[in-house]
Amino acid sequence: MTHYLKYVFVITTLAGANTAYAQAQEHYQELEVGVGGNIKHTHTDVNYKNKEFDLHIHPLWESRYVTEGRDNLAGNGIASIATEFNYKNFAVIPWAAKGISSDYSELNLNAIYTAHLSERIEMYVGYNYIKAREEGIDAHDNELSLDFAYFYADDIQLLSSVYHSFDASGTFLELAVKKDFYINDLLLLDIQSGVGFNAGYVSDGHNGINNVKFTANLSYQLFNQLALYTYTSYSIAVNKDEKRFAGDETLRNIFWGGVGLSYQY
């Protein structure tokens, strides 16, 4: 089992109509690691807008380790820490995780490039090296990913993410829509729903639609450089057939959540 690189756009700003777009430029957008080691595109305080280089640190606890709708650690949680080195449109992001009450560990080394294709469209190209260890068995993988974000309005984004595993010789596609709620200057909420499609990425799972997922993310700015964030998710298994596909055994209807910190240096 390996971790699967994909982007989750948790708190983004807007490229909408001209007035709204100008207002959005007050926030600087960059990459961070979010829940489950997923890469997300987020905004930070305007004080960081003119810094070519910055560093972020993120410890995180999650009640389960879920990817592609699958409960990877049989109901056990996972703790992780990530460090993001951001320079202009590039980001290098190491992510290390350890299973809670399970013999599992994982290291991801991510390299991401962001391209602003237009006022409303952004593209993200990524490479991820993965090293995992479970019950004394090592696994390695290399992945490529391509993501797009379309800013339909100042608080609504349409998202697509496709990532390919060289080890499995397969691909997984996720399509989602996200709604942002800017409660106040300190408190941000977003709700996201999406659907996942397997094409050989989970090599022993069924191809086609695999799951539908709903997520609510909440972040609170504790101090100028420190934020607290939490999330809850629910994934619904679609077309599960564990009698024919061994990889569908862990494809389940699952509820889980997480809590962490984000420190900007």
Image: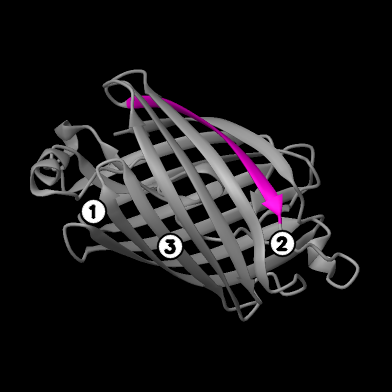
Amino acid bearing label 3: Ser
Q: How is the image coloured?
A: one colour
The reply to whether discs 2 and 1 touch (Cβ–Cβ < 8 Å) is no
Amino acid bearing label 2: Met
Considering the numbered disc 1 on the image, is that residue within a helix, a strand or a loop? strand
Considering the numbered disc 3 on the image, is that residue within a helix, a strand or a loop? strand
Query: Residue 1, which numbered label?
Result: 2
Span colored in magenta: 226-237
The picture places residue 181, in percent across and down from the top left corner, at: 35, 31
Q: Earlier in the sequence, mark 3 or mark 1?
A: 1
User: Could one spot residue 68 in this view of the protein?
Assistant: no
Q: Quadrant of the C terminus?
A: top left
Q: Report which residue position mark 1 lands on.
A: 87
Considering the numbered disc 2 on the image, is that residue within a helix, a strand or a loop? loop
Inspect the magenta stretch and tell me whether residue 229 lies in it: yes
Q: For the residues marked 3 and 1, what is the alpha-carbon distance in whole angstroms?
A: 24 Å
